[in-house]
Image (spheres, rainbow, N blue to C red):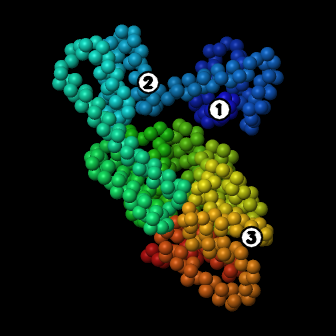
Amino acid sequence: MKRVDSVISLIYSMSKAEKKAFSVQMLKDKEEKDYLVIYDIITKSKQLDSKNVKGEFHKRRPGGSFEVSIQYLYERLTDSLLTLRKKKDIYYDLLNNLCKARMLYERSLFEECFEILSDTIEQATYYENNEVLTIALKLELEYLLRLNFPNLAESELYHKHFMQNEALKKTRKIVEQSSLHNLLKYRLSHIGSIRTSKQKQDMNDLMVNELSIAASSGIEGNFELMRNHRLFQANYLMGAGEYKAALNSYKELSRLFEQNRQFWSNPPIYYLSVLEGVLGSLRVCGQYDEIPYFLDKLKKLISDASSFEFQVNAICLLFQYELFPYLDNGDFLDCTKLMAYYQKSLYDKEAWLSPVRKSELLLYTALVHIGNQNYKAAKKYISNAIIDHNIKYQPLMRTIRLVRLIVYYEMHEYEFVYHESRSINRSLSSPKEHTFKTEHIILWFLNQQHLPVLRKDREAFWEKLLPEVQALYDDKYENQLLHLCDLTAWIEAKILKENLSDVLKRHMHMKELLQK
């Protein structure tokens, strides 16, 4: 990213309070300097790119150096934002204390240096920040060594070494645990949920290793080890299709976070992932009545957020789980109203979304337009999702490609459907790909050239297909795709010539009866 693009992104991400604080600092400059001209151009323009900024700058400052000014503005902005983090981010404060201690030692202010290090060690221990604790202890021991251990008993020296070794042990356990969790998340993101016995065995190997680490680490009483352990369990259970067990794990995780707010990161990305896990499990289990309770927690998280990017991604998650009860029940008009409500706070800021979150937003928006039979709008959104190369090889892209085929089918562009179906079939036939039966059924239906005309013949056609479709719902692995979006409902609606909304309502009613 060019420096000017970085500055534009940085300014757009700043809150009103941050911009105000920066403006107060700028007032110290009595004359309008070149870097302030660039800041003024960016803040007063809603849509611009680096060329426009540079062009406008040279109009106002014909003899000014744009590259020097943009670099200086970048440095002033980052310095200002870092200053504002003081007393708001414990990690920043602890690292800042380490820098202060080094500076004081270099100026022979030894007593003040050791006071800061002692306070940093105490806080790092309280917040279980083993990395900072290790560095602080290392600095303290190094400085004590240089001064020949003044006023230090041997037992105190032993204790400091003991603390250092314990911090290193915990850090190593956390790194081992995190590596297994990263592997699990990587496989679930890039390969998809468990569908074969081989995949299950690979995942089980990770589970056994993680349990071994948890058992040997004494995780009780250590927030990060406990958090990583339960996150691993919950993600594993979701990937294995054990949704009720996953829901219980996520609820335990939520309680753990609520009881240990002092350990939340800033922004609280881990707690956001926990809330997403709880909400996803509730949706899969059909417990929609519990969703509002956790959405309230998510709203509180959004209102307290200091990071603009985090806030936008959290708003997208909030939107999705306010949308799903309507979408799953086929209430497409309510979905449309909700989309309009989130236009300013979400859709206008979609550039700040992560690639996966943005693709999910485009996918579900396209599904709503399909339900409203607005296929032109659906084509626009699903086409935008297709061009994102960041998710090209992720399982979500396969669902997006299927939905795009459905849109083109509805628009009677059968030639495109035929050729794209062949392309998808080739990728699904690859030995590296583990496919869902649902995908094959949808592709098969999309290429049926002659559907029965008479109502009774259509009903007979559906009755013949129904056992195969029903088997998908009974398969916990196939359910992983159906819970993302129920594409078989669209097939049923097309065969029986019914409204998709009515079919989804019927499916929802059947699920409610099965749960009772």
What amino acid does circle 1 point to? Ser
Q: Where is residue 42 shown, x and y percent of the image?
A: 71, 30
Which residue lies under the disc numbered 3? Answer: 418
Q: Work out which quarter of the rendered image holds the C terminus and state it.
A: bottom left
Q: How many marks?
A: 3
Which residue lies under the disc numbered 2? Answer: 96
Q: Quadrant of residue 375?
A: bottom right
Which residue lies under the disc numbered 1? Answer: 6
* Tag 3 and tag 1, C-beta contact below 8 Å: no
Task: Name the N-terminal-most of marks 3 and 1.
Answer: 1
Foreground residue, 56 or 449? 449
Vertical side of 267 occupied by 107: above or below:
above
| Residue sitting at x 68%, y 55% | 385
What amino acid does circle 2 point to? Asn
Q: CA distance from mark 3 to mark 1?
A: 43 Å
Q: Does residue 75 appear to the left or right of 34 in the view shown?
A: left
| Residue sitting at x 47%, y 77% | 514
| Residue sitting at x 71%, y 22% | 67
Of tags 3 and 1, the one toward the viewer is 3
Vertical side of 90 occupied by 35: above or below:
above
Residue 393 appears in the rendering: yes
How busy is the neighbourhood of tag 3: few (under 14 within 10 Å), some, or many (20 plus)?
some
How busy is the neighbourhood of tag 2: few (under 14 within 10 Å), some, or many (20 plus)?
few
Callout 1: helix, strand or loop? Answer: helix
Residue lying furthest front in this view? 431
